[in-house]
Amino acid sequence: MKFRKWLLGIILAIGVYSIIIFLSDFSILVHHLQNVKMEYVLLGVLAIFSGLIVRSFRWNLMIRELGIQINLKSSILIYLCGTAFGLSPGRLGEVAKSHYLKRLVDAPISKTAPTIIIERFLDVFAILIIALSSVLLIGEKHQEILLGYIAVGIFLLLIYKKKHLIKILKKAESIPVLKRISNNLIPSIDIIFLLLKPKIFAKTFFLSALSWLIESLVVYLVLKSFNIDLSIIKSAFIYVVSSLIGSSSLLPGGIGTTEGGLLAFFLWENIKYDDAIGPIIVIRILVLWMTIIFGIIVNRLTEMTILKNK
């Protein structure tokens, strides 16, 4: 990622967090942060890294399906390198993983780059299923949830028809922000359909849903660290939907929109503004900034080990 994009993300983050903190009672925020139960925060860290490992297995399944031979250790390392690009809109900067694969095993970038798009599709699909299931388990609006499941099912059937998917991509060309993505996807349509075959899709979807469920524990655990009780089911709903809102905004790292989503849901759950700010800051530090820093470190280690002299 270019330095100016990093700078934009950092400036945006400083602006957003400054406004959030300015609108709060700073003394209450400091008091809450000083009394955080670190054991819950550390469990949140474990949840985030566990989710990343599950996703790395998902990516390994996809590249093996493409016939690319690489050992599991190297595959996981290259996947984790992609977390350094968390500030890219929709995390599409993770296409850097394809460049690393090219250097390591001479895998064509045009062959492996579509895995990034499939990952985002799997993430959105998993988020929708988890969100719908969470609302169903909470016990609200059963008829609407059933319609939601049907809509997701119909969409899935449509994309399994190549001609329908091509039509969708061609229509996306009329939307400026999607034009470049659509133009890159159409030549890769055969690879996309290979990765969406029922056998591989069932495995990758299961791992996607599992990773999101594990990561969603971070909301529950961080709230617990601030002595705020919220059910695991509601925490899962808040995490996945806020993440989707952030990604859909196409802002660097979803900064501003993800925080806004978390705040809106916390207020909906009758958590006071001053009580919600501390958890939001900690959640975003763990989910976004910690993983980016971790990715940068893994990038450096990977360059010094498996990619050395490549």
Image (cartoon, grey):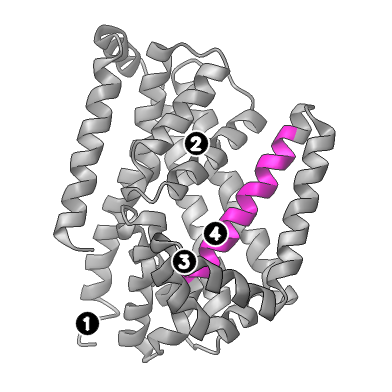
Tell me which secondary structure the magenta stretch mostly adopts.
Answer: helix
Between discs 2 and 3, the one toward the N terminus: 3
Q: Quadrant of the N terminus?
A: bottom left
**Mark with earlier residue (1, 4):** 4
In space, the residues marked 2 and 1 are separated at their CA atoms by 35 Å
| Quadrant in which residue 189 is drawn | bottom right
| Label 4 residue SS | helix
Which label's residue is closer to the chain start, 1 or 3? 3
Q: Amino acid at mark 3?
A: Ser
CB under 8 Å between callouts 4 and 3? no
Residue 295 image position (x, y, % from top left):
31, 58
For the record, the magenta segment spans 116-135
The residue indicated by pointer 4 is: 54
- Mark 2 or 1 closer to N-term? 2
Mark-to-mark CA distance, 1 and 4: 26 Å
Label 4 vs 3, first from the N-terminus: 4
Question: Can you identify the residue that label 2 sits on?
Answer: 218
Q: Which residue is mark 3?
A: 174
Q: Are marks 2 and 3 in contact (CB under 8 Å)?
A: no
Residue at the far front in the pictured view: 174
Q: Residue at x 53, y 25 (%)?
A: 265
Q: Amino acid at mark 1?
A: Lys
Q: Where 19 sits versus 150, above or below?
A: above
Instruction: Give the foreground label among 1 and 3.
Output: 3
Q: Earlier in the sequence, mark 4 or mark 2?
A: 4
